[in-house]
Amino acid sequence: MRLPAVDHLVYAAPNLKQAADQLEARLGVRAAAGGKHLGWGTHNALLSLGTGAYLEIIAPDPGQGVPERPLPLGLAGLTEPRLVTWAVKAPAIDGRVALARAAGYDPGDVLALSRALPDGSRLDWRLTPPPTVGDGIVPFLIEWETALHPSETAPAGCTLTRLRAEHPQPKQLGPMLAALGVELRVDKRSSPTLIATLKTPRGRVELR
């Protein structure tokens, strides 16, 4: 099975610096500060995965104080870093949403979001919200409205070579993935898990 059109993998953590330190030790490359998601109470660091994809490490941002809304991606109750979801490239995102709905799966309304960068500039993008179904294995859609994709500016050295998943009920996820136009191997296991295989300066690494 070919690698799907991954835009980025989302690696959630209780603490951004600690997660970046741990990943640097495992991968041999240091993720760079990405910026703050103002109003969401989070900040991130990024690592290029080659082929137009990147890894986003996201964590609560203590510098923002109490966020305006609940922390996303289960961060409020997270105790250990893990891959929590992923995004698929979706040029002409409105059309992709319409096709998915016609196929029987609603990925949600498209939202316009942005992130403040360390240099004071801003990134803008449009996406569907991370699904509340599928345990992070069903991706969300994203369309960038910036000239440079984050994978082009994040530290390089790692390459995503494979993405697969495990889930107790993989047949339930098939129609949703198909409606999004996504091919992803999902094996039957007791716990939902997203698994990325990376080629790194430290060798082959599986990130879960």
Image (tube, rainbow, N blue to C red):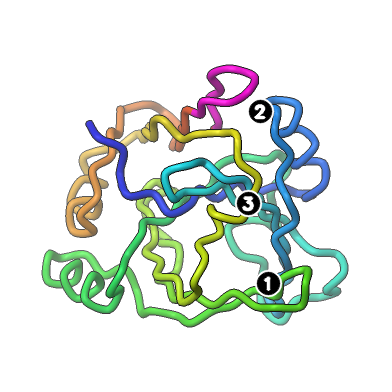
The magenta segment: 198-207
* Residue 27: image tag: 2
Front disc: 3 or 1: 3
Residue under label 1: 37
Q: Residues within 10 Å of mark 2 (few under 14, many from 20)?
A: many
Which amino acid is tagged 2? Leu
Q: Nearer the viewer, residue 5 or 104?
A: 5
> Circle 2 — which element?
helix
Q: Amino acid at mark 1?
A: His
Helix, strand or loop at mark 3: loop
Q: Is residue 66 rendered to the left or right of residue 170?
A: right
Q: Tell me, yes or no, whether the highlighted magenta stretch contains residue 204.
A: yes
Instruction: Say what secondary structure mark 1 lies in.
Output: strand
Residue 154, disc:
3
Residue 85: % across, % down: 48, 50
User: To which quarter of the image does residue 181 belong?
Assistant: bottom left
Whether residue 14 is situated above or below residue 37 in the rendered picture: above
Where residue 128 appears, as percent x and y from the top left, is: 40, 71
User: Marks 1 and 2, how far apart in space?
Assistant: 26 Å
The image shows residue 17, relative to residue 93, as above or below, that is above
Residue 1 lies, with reference to residue 149, above or below; the image says: above
Please tell me which residue is depicted at 49% across the width and 34% down the height of the picture.
Answer: 159
Location of the N terminus (image quadrant): top left
